[in-house]
Amino acid sequence: MPERSASTLLSRALHLRCPRCGEGPLFIGWFRMHERCSGCQLKYERSPGYFLGSTYINYGQTSLTMSAAYLILHFGYGVPKEWVAPPLAVYCMLWPLFWFRYARSLFLAFDCFFDASDFESDEGGGDESEN
Ligand SMILES: [Zn+2]
């Protein structure tokens, strides 16, 4: 069985690599994913709509960092909220675009960690009636 410790999966996710083998890249471009791993042939989109879960990671990370930045800047350093809000609004629009790939990669790694049985097969664990 391949190495699937939390630290290994986290490292593979942050390097945007396949969670199962760590070899194949997940993305072709900024937003486009490979269908399968070039190293182990794992199908990345495990079922239709699989990556919807990654939006929770993206949204949660963006709102947590934005809230922390607001609290630190406004209450910690006394920056007026009129000065803090516009840059943070821009941050909330741009950061999720940057974080998109990492959110998907982390979601895939979390799924592999918590439900590794689904990652034994090269195919997804979802709707098998397509074939
Ligand atoms: Zn792989």
Image: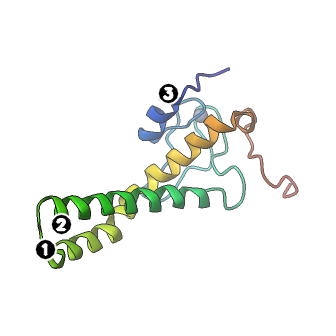
Disc 1 vs disc 3: which is toward the camera?
A: 1
In the image, the residue with mark 3 has its CB under 8 Å from the nearest atom of ligand 1: no
**x and y percent of residue 88 in the render?**
26, 69
Q: Amino acid at mark 3?
A: Thr
Mark-to-mark CA distance, 2 and 1: 6 Å
Residues marked 2 and 1 touching at CB (< 8 Å): yes
Q: Which residue is mark 1?
A: 80
Q: Which residue is mark 2?
A: 74
| Residue drawn at (56%, 40%) of the image | 109
Which secondary structure lies at badge 1?
loop
Image position of 86 (left or right of 30): left
Image position of 107 (left or right of 11): right
Mark-to-mark CA distance, 1 and 3: 43 Å
Label placed on residue 8: 3
Please tell me which residue lies in front, 99 or 27: 99
Q: How many marks?
A: 3
Q: Amino acid at mark 1?
A: Pro
Mark nearer the N terminus (1 vs 3): 3
